Amino acid sequence: MTIEDQGHIAADPPAATRSGFFARMRDTDLYYSFRSSRLVMLAAAITLLIVGASLLAPVIAPHDPYDLRALNLMDSDLPPAWVTGGDRRFLLGTDDQGRDILSTILYGTRSSIAISLLAVLLAIAIGVSAGLVAGYYGGIADTLIMRIADVKLTFPAILVALLINGIAQTLFKGRLGGSEFWILVLSIGLSFWVQYARTVRGMTLVEKNKEYVQAARLIGLGKTAIMFKHVLPNVLSPVLVIGTINLALAVITEATLSFLGVGLPPTEPSLGTMIQIGNKYLFSGSWWMVAFPGITLAVLVLAVNLLGDWLRDALNPKLR
């Protein structure tokens, strides 16, 4: 047997392993549930299309809306290209500063998705950790965390986000220096952690009395190791579902904050900022400034919500 043959034999198992993995994935109930619903497949395709287009904005956008040197006020307030008075250079028209609406939507969607995704990850990190500690330790820790969660539930998420954003704006007034992005992430993330904490706490109360946790205690594992290495993997399914649904809520919350003027600056607009700017010119006949960003926001939120509803039903053992 030659060295080349040995190399081919050594390279074959990984390929077989990969094919076996995808074959097993195709045999799962989750994949069957996904393929059996055309609406869910359409929602997934739309989500991938919007996310992919936003990630590739620097490559596929006709213009760079952040390059102030390329803007021309003579091109401001142009209607879409198919409307009388439109310009073929700007397919969806321009805004009050002469920025291409299509390019601004691509860049703005990327900002909205990035803020929402990071905010949801922050909420998951805080909520899951708090829920594990409350459920596993119990006692004073459980009482303190749950009472804080109860107080948080008395305030709407948007009000909490506005409060945190206002405090940050006041403390760092004139010294933000582009920190608006991270202030939005913090504001939205701290608005959504309670749902994860309450869900994980309830499941941890059940899991901590099971035999595998008792076996881990017997072999001398510490409480932190048991919580994060053994209990956590068994409570992640509902967290993934809540996270998917909250991603759509985070997009709406970011758009709402930006619409209220406490989001990203107009020089780096998100979808909410674009809608806020376009709303000023709506009654003057410049409908495209608010229509196209609004449609993009609605389609993105609807698609993500459909995926979240499907994932919730697919992972629910009572519906199988």
Image (spheres, rainbow, N blue to C red):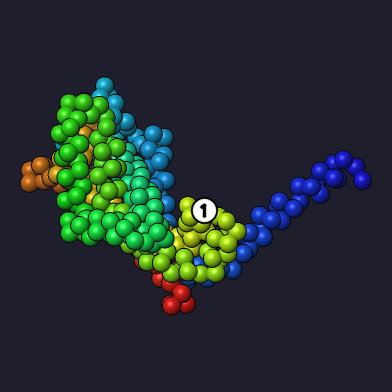
Q: Nearer the viewer, residue 183 or 273?
A: 183
Work out whether 225 lies above or below 273.
below
Location of residue 71 by image quarter: top left
Q: Amino acid at mark 1?
A: Gly
Residue corresponding to mark 1:
222
Q: Nearer the viewer, residue 170 or 184?
A: 170
Residue at 51%, 57% (x, y): give it: 226
Q: Of helix, strand and loop, which one carries label 1?
A: loop
Residue 6 % position (x, y): 85, 45
Residue at 60%, 59% (x, y): give it: 219
Work out whether 44 lies above or below 206.
above
Residue at 16%, 45% (x, y): give it: 163
Q: Is residue 303 left or right of residue 174?
A: right
Q: Is residue 227 left or right of residue 212?
A: left
Residue 276 % position (x, y): 16, 43
Location of residue 267 by image quarter: top left
Label 1 environment density (alpha carbons within 10 Å; few <14, some 14–19, many ≥20): few
